[in-house]
Image (cartoon, rainbow, N blue to C red):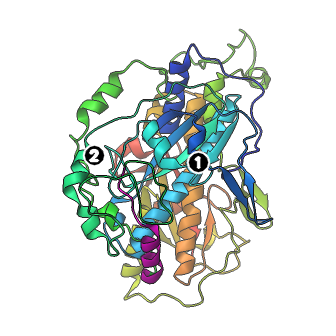
Amino acid sequence: MYAWDEEKSRQKATFTDLKEASLIVKDAARFLGRSLVGIAEYDQKWVYSTWYDFSTKESIPAEFPFPVKSVIVIAVDTDYRGCLTSPSLISSAATGLGYSKMAETARKMATFIRMLGYNAIPSGNDTAISIPLAIQAGLGELGRNGMLITPEYGPRVRLLKVLTDMPLQPDKPITFGVSQFCMKCKKCAYSCPTGAIPLDSKPTMYGDSMSNCDGVLKWYTDPERCYKFWALNGAECSNCIACCPYNKWSSWHHGLTQRLKESIRDKPSVKKAEKNDSGIEKNTVPSEPGTSMADQSSKKREYNIVDYAICKAAAAISDYTAKDNCFVIHEQDLCEWSSKHNQSKMKFQDATQASFIVNRAAMFLGANLVGIADYDKRYMHSGLSFEPKSVIVMGFVMKDETRYINSSIIATASTGLGHSQMAGTEKKVATFIRELGFKAKPCGDETVPSIPLAIMAGLGECGRNGLLVTRSMGQEFSCVRYLRIWI
């Protein structure tokens, strides 16, 4: 997911100015599923001076294969209700899910930048320090708990970066009163079970832990105390995130003014293309009069490079390749059939309780719609190594805006994004079932028909267009992608 050496386009995209390039990059990040994105100018002081090579067990000087100019910083929000259960395995699951989303988004964004003709290095917690870059990119402020506090989600975010040689207009740091509030609040310090967060009224220039780097005016936490509690607890601790007053479930009116301002702003966009009623795609070469459909389709279509880049990025982890009785997605084994399951089976009161737990888990892990169907031999796949009892059917909603774009490559990108979400979720849900002690075989559009199983699972009916139309939101949910897991 964080590969540095993947190929880039030989043709570089050109923009009118840095502002246009930055707006397109931000729109791409939002299209790919992340709402918080900022851009920071590259600063060597935030890059780790040495990197550790685990194969040779040696530290090596930090050196990039190209001159970095900009850093795209993206914040991934974690599950609110899961976070509130801290310190528990459920809150750890919310954190782990955040890291999974980080990896997927990092790969997609790096692919997008490379398809524009520029180099890109995707990064999670490695390579460079995330929080200073996020502050520099205008995503939030530093809090007493040592974490980034965002206006939208408080400290309930995970951070990823994409370092690139693409010239972009950097954002400015923001201030919304976090430091002043933290001076008085102290809830995170009182909620910390180990006292790893200081109770000092004002920030200082020095810390007491060997992990602290003195010389910055802030509240210094004690990571050693924090991690010792993690080890004793058997799960991560997110108390300082859960109790933070900035970590609140937003009502519809929170941030309404800012959202309205952004929605009416005139800006380039990779997703808000105009509806095409002419039958000829924008950004394609018009066909000559009198040519047949076959002749037209045989000609190479010259898409706008930005649209093509977002299409490739959306499908960055969802290109299926058949291999050894399983379906491999970019060698990530997301659809692997042969994974081992826990030998100790989870016991439930009845099938209703088991179905309820599976449904909740699938929704937590990213599915928009979940249903369960009985096993039916008519839809059996000969490659299964066991006879299933049930089929979990999950639906994933495509980007709403793209439904109104006729035959656009952006609509294709939306479909690819749906497949990408399918790929990530099926791996997680199959892992969940296996950890409960049962066998699970995930599959997407391949191997067995989706729509009959979705109908059996109560997700909807088959429409005139041959697609499943769900009852949840009428036609608006007809643009879905489905996967099945045999158990």
Q: Where is residue 275 in the image (x, y as percent from the top left)?
A: 48, 22
Q: Tell me the SS state at disc 2.
A: helix
Q: Position of residue 101 (x, y in %)?
A: 52, 54
- Residue drawn at 34 percent across, 27 percent down: 263
Q: Is residue 470 above or below residue 414?
A: below
Looking at the image, tell me whether mark 1 or mark 2 is earlier in sequence order: 1
- Residue drawn at 66 percent across, 34 percent down: 68
Q: Is residue 197 above or below residue 21?
A: below
Cα distance in 3D space between marks 1 and 2: 24 Å
- Residue drawn at 60 percent across, 74 percent down: 440
Q: Are marks 1 and 2 in contact (CB under 8 Å)?
A: no
182 lies left or right of 226? left
- Compare residues 35 and 74 and report the one nearer the observer: 74
Residue topped by disc 2: 178
- Compare residues 206 and 465 and report the one nearer the observer: 206
Q: Quadrant of residue 163?
A: top right
202 lies left or right of 308? left
Label 2, residues with CA under 10 Å away: few <14, some 14-19, many ≥20: some
Q: In this view, does 200 lie above or below 9?
A: below
Residue topped by disc 1: 128
Label 1, residues with CA under 10 Å away: few <14, some 14-19, many ≥20: many
- Compare residues 355 and 120 and report the one nearer the observer: 120
Q: Does the magenta stretch include residue 225?
A: yes
Magenta part of the chain: 218-233
Q: In which quarter of the image is residue 341?
A: bottom right
